């Protein structure tokens, strides 16, 4: 079962029967493509039976890192151990113990739902009896009972997503990699998909999920934030947000655009975001943001109320990535 989350983040899964409680270890992981350094000296530790999120904008190195971790791409530098196996040296042995799902639907559109699952069971070497039992179980679990003969290409986006997930776990992998799996589906399908991910985690599967959706990242037990190939934050979402206490305020102003202009270039301010008629301000470490923002608005003749606000994961993301731009470390 997944360990309960504490104030400082989820507890580590205990060692069972001498098995290491860490599913993935990477140290100094780097990847160059010519002059481009896509991944730069990343250290990563993923606990077993956790949903671990990779958060970052497109081009941040998430997909490249995942491909190195599962043995599809050889790193330029660094050491990787996944499920106790050295990667890429033991990648062939690892492939039978992991699943991989990409954002692009990669199953056969001209095969039926059932035929796709049976084909994947054969690829992973399941016996005829084991294949039949596993396919039946997945059809029931992922709600395909009345769609078994339907061609995969005619399914909706959410249904294709569920089928791809079922195919990725046909061999009951210990570790599942999911690369932007919900980028092309509606919000309801995304929520249902995440319920399925937590069911897998409850059963003991470790999941590494890359995403650029803040609400999805907040669901994870732990997250890593990548920015231009560099790991700029790593921890439980709640704990990372708590580290920003005292650095965020909300501004209620009759003229929010004018207030935004005043605050955008204020020393010590990392970002100003308008949300409806209010502004959310994030400051750099050490700034007395509430006093500084109030003083700046008064001096500019802008009537506004300034109150402390609770940091969220979007604040964490902005603090980590913009701090990285300025050469700062951590959030």
Image (cartoon, rainbow, N blue to C red):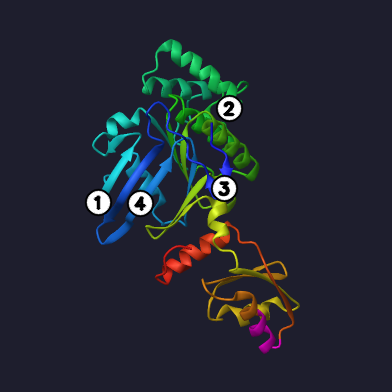
Depth order, front residue of 255/289: 289
Instruction: Give the CA distance from mark 3 to mark 2.
Output: 20 Å
User: Relative to 18, is 54 on the left or the right?
Assistant: right
Range covered by the magenta-colored residues: 294-301
Q: Secondary structure at mark 1?
A: strand
Which residue bears the numbered disc 1? 77
| Residue 290 position within the rendered picture, expressed as x and y whole percent measured from the top left | 64, 75
Q: Which mark is residue 142?
A: 2
Reading the image, the residue beneath label 3 is 216
Contact between labelled residues 1 and 3, with CB atoms less than 8 Å apart:
no
Quarter of the image that includes the N terminus: top right
- Can residue 156 be spotted in the picture? no
In this rendering, which labeled residue sits more in front, label 2 or label 4? 4
Alpha-carbon distance for marks 3 and 4?
23 Å
Residue with the mark numbered 4: 43
For marks 3 and 1 on the same chain, the one whose residue lies earlier in the sequence: 1
Foreground mark, 4 or 1, reads 4
Looking at the picture, how far across and down is residue 188, in whole percent?
65, 41
What residue lies at 62% left-to-right and 41% top-to-bottom? 191
């Amino acid at each position: 079962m997944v360990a309960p989350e504490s104030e400082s983040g989820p507890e580590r899964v205990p060692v069972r029967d001498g098995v290491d409680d860490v599913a993935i270890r990477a140290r100094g992981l780097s990847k160059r493509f010519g002059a481009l350094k896509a991944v730069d000296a990343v250290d990563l530790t993923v606990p077993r039976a956790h949903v671990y999120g990779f958060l970052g904008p497109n081009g941040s190195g998430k997909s490249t890192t995942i491909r190195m971790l599962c043995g599809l791409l050889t790193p330029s530098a660094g050491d990787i151990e996944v499920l106790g196996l050295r990667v890429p040296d033991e990648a062939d042995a690892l492939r039978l113990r992991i699943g991989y799902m990409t954002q692009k639907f990669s199953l056969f559109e001209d095969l039926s739902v059932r035929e796709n699952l049976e084909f994947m069971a054969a690829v992973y070497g399941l016996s005829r009896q084991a294949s039949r039992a596993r396919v039946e179980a997945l059809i029931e679990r992922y709600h395909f009972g009345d769609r078994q003969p339907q061609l995969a290409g005619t399914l909706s986006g959410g249904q294709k997503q569920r089928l791809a997930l079922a195919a990725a776990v046909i061999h009951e992998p210990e570790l599942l990699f999911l690369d932007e799996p919900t980028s092309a589906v509606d919000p309801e399908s995304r929520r249902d998909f995440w319920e399925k991910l937590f069911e897998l985690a409850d059963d003991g599967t470790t999941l590494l999920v890359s995403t650029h959706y803040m609400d999805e990242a907040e669901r994870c037990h732990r997250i890593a934030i990548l920015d231009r190939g560099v790991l700029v934050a790593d921890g439980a979402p709640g704990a990372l947000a708590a580290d920003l206490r005292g650095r965020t305020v909300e501004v209620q102003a009759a003229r929010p655009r004018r207030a935004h202009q005043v605050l955008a270039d204020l020393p010590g301010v990392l970002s100003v975001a308008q949300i409806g008629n209010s502004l959310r301000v994030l400051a750099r470490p050490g700034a007395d943001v509430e006093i500084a923002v109030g003083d700046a608005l008064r001096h500019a003749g802008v009537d506004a109320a300034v109150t402390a606000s609770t940091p969220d994961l979007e604040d964490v993301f902005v603090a980590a990535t913009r701090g990285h731009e300025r050469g700062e470390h951590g959030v």
